[in-house]
């Protein structure tokens, strides 16, 4: 869509052809670049079609529309689209009962479908005790909508998600990761709007894990812990309400992804035999940090034996191609591996070398290897992962024999993968204030 | 006597971000009245249906307008607007040589 605009900007008539399900997405993208009148031709050609007969009949069906798009005179509305007054919501947007607020927010498309905590001035003020930054501090503008990301807006969304003020430092650092994300294919916006339904996965390291009682043990990725639940939920609301990525309009994920409700992991650094993830990425052990990835899939597997070979062969057997692999070893497996002499780097090197797939899954394929120069031999294999830096090894999870693997999208290694978390001056007092927020389950 | 409590009333802040005022831009490129004798640019990107759609279009447009000619261009950096890629100058030169452009995205 942006290329259609660049042609029109250079005075060349242009038309874009889109599957009919993507027309609203195309218009939103054009508006975000301030040229809403671009000519988009809807087609019924299946998305990413490979059947040439389907493509040919679909093209015949839109041929007249394409010709018209290139030759029809410009209408007055196309020449001078009415400048829309940007919505400038008042600071206070609504007053009503709890039910009325739920309905109002839901109908505006500002929630994730679940009820929200009303972001009253008092609740937002309480949330703001989690940072020393003034509420009107502008951190940047979040794409694609270019929404202004102020500390107050972050706090409002954090209140709605049920976060505690002690989570705000993590949320601010995570938001900065979105703002600083690289442009292009491996950036936040591509993953946020893609048909591939990639979801943010946040991994928290450092002392703050314990201060805010993030779960890095049994059921780390399951519901039931307010920190894991509310931090990820807040980030989902920030992406929607500040970045303007709405499902079915900008977010064109075909199947969607339950990880988008929340996906916050944390490392069990105390029981890990290895250096934690943030230290691998260059920070001090005493720092707290949040790391980002955009997995499509989360799978769990079980080792064929509980020695080092059984554990690693299981990971090897489940590898799929991806930009980033987040592999969660439970503490028991991590100890077994370390005792057998495995470092994190050894594991990465093993997976790069031995994680392989047939070079020619399709016997009729004519695809060539090595820059398109070499014809694969029958039985020849190629590496699934070429760069060990895309593998992250994290120790987490409870007792038991399973391990987990979240794989899919992620930043280019070394490009805004991790952000140090800045704590407010009153941190210890704040932690003390909310330290009793832990579930106490009755025995039955 | 049972008292009936009034539902709590909340004044709430907006979670929706403000944006800077936007001045919308219109289209200004004059449209040709006919495609006869024109050169049409065909721009495809990485998604696998993008190029075959244009190949089919080329075939059917050529049948309709035998004097039409075509010029092809492939996206150089995946999911990156061409004017933001290192090939911006090459792209702009290419645009100068066409009368109109068709873009396909495969979706």
Image: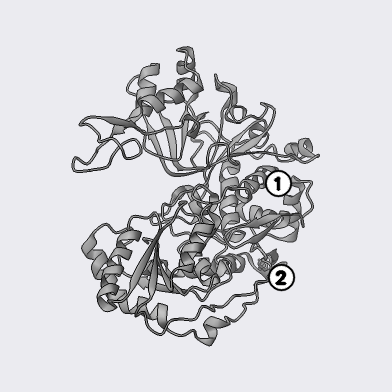
Alpha carbons under labels 1 and 2: distance apart = 24 Å
Circles 1 and 2: CB distance less than 8 Å? no
Q: Residue at x 58, y 23 (%)?
A: A275
Q: Residue at x 76, y 54 (%)?
A: A137
Given this view, does label 1 or label 2 mark the residue nearer the observer? 2
Q: Dot 2: what SS?
A: loop
A336, A176: nearer the viewer? A176
Return the x and y of residue B15 as percentages of the image width and height. Answer: 65, 61
Q: Chain of mark 2?
A: A
Please say if A63 is above or below B87.
below
| Label 1 neighbour load within 10 Å: few <14, some 14-19, many 20+ | many
A381, A238: nearer the viewer? A381
Q: Name the residue beneath numbered marker 1.
A: A165
Dividing the picture into quadrants, the one containing residue B106 is bottom left
Q: Is residue B1 visible?
A: no
Q: Dot 1: what SS?
A: helix
Q: Name the residue beneath numbered marker 2.
A: A90
Dividing the picture into quadrants, the one containing residue A229 is top right
Return the x and y of residue A142 as percentages of the image width and height. Answer: 62, 57
Return the x and y of residue A361 as percentages of the image width and height. Answer: 24, 39
Q: Is residue A334 visible?
A: yes
Return the x and y of residue A424 as percentages of the image width and height. Answer: 77, 41
Q: Chain of mark 1?
A: A
Dividing the picture into quadrants, the one containing residue B105 is bottom left
Q: Is the same chain shared between marks 1 and 2? A: yes
The disc, 1 or 2, on the residue closer to the chain's N-terminal end is 2
Q: Tell me if B93 is positioned left or right of A284 in this view.
A: left
Q: Residue at x 27, y 57 (%)?
A: A50
């Amino acid at each position: 869509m942006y290329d259609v605009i660049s042609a029109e900007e250079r005075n060349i008539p242009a038309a874009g052809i889109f599957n009919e399900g993507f027309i609203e997405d195309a218009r939103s993208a054009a508006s975000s670049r301030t040229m809403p009148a671009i000519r988009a031709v809807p087609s019924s050609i299946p998305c990413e079609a490979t059947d040439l007969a389907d493509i040919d009949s679909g093209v015949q069906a839109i041929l007249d529309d394409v010709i018209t798009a290139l030759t029809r005179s410009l209408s007055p509305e196309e020449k001078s689209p009415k400048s829309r007054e940007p919505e400038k919501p008042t600071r206070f947007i609504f007053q009503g009962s709890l039910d009325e607020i739920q309905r109002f927010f839901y109908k505006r498309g500002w929630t994730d479908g679940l009820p929200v905590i009303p972001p009253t001035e008092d609740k937002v003020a309480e949330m703001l005790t989690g940072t020393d930054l003034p509420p009107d501090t502008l951190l940047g503008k979040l794409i694609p909508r270019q929404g202004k990301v102020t500390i107050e807006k972050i706090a409002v969304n954090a209140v709605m998600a049920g976060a505690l003020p002690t989570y705000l430092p993590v949320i601010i650092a995570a938001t900065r990761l979105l703002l600083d994300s690289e442009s292009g294919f491996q950036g936040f916006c591509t993953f946020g709007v893609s048909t591939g339904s990639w979801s943010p996965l946040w991994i928290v390291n450092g002392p703050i894990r314990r201060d805010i009682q993030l779960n890095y043990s049994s059921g780390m990725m399951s519901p039931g812990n307010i920190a894991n639940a509310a931090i990820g939920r807040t980030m989902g609301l920030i992406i929607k309400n500040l970045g303007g990525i709405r499902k079915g309009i900008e977010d064109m994920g075909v199947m969607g992804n339950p990880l988008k409700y929340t996906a916050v992991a944390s490392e069990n650094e105390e029981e890990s035999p290895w250096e934690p993830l943030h230290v691998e990425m260059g920070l001090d052990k005493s720092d707290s940090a949040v790391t980002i990835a955009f997995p499509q899939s989360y799978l769990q597997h079980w080792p064929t034996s509980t020695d080092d070979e059984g554990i690693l062969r299981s990971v090897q057997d489940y590898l799929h191609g991806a930009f980033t692999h987040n592999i969660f070893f439970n503490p028991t497996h991590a100890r077994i591996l370390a005792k057998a002499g495995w470092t994190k780097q050894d594991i990465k090197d093993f997976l790069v070398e031995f994680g392989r797939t047939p070079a020619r899954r399709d016997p009729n394929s004519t695809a060539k290897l090595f820059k398109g120069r070499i014809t694969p031999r029958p039985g020849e294999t190629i590496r699934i992962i070429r760069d060990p830096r895309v593998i992250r090894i994290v120790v987490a999870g409870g007792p038991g024999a399973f391990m987990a693997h979240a794989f899919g999208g992620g930043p280019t290694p070394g490009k805004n993968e991790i952000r140090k978390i800045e704590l407010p001056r009153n941190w210890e007092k704040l932690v003390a204030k909310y330290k009793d927020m832990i579930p106490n389950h009755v025995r039955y | 006597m049972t008292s009936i409590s009034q539902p709590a009333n909340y004044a709430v802040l907006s979670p929706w971000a403000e944006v800077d005022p936007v001045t919308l831009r219109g289209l200004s490129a004059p449209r040709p009245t006919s495609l006869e004798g024109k050169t049409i640019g065909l721009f495809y990107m990485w998604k696998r249906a993008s190029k075959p759609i244009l190949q089919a279009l080329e075939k059917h447009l050529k049948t309709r307008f035998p004097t039409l000619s075509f010029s092809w261009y492939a996206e150089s950096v995946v999911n990156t607007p061409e004017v933001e890629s290192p090939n911006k100058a090459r792209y702009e030169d290419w645009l100068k040589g066409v009368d109109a452009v068709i873009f396909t995205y495969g979706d």
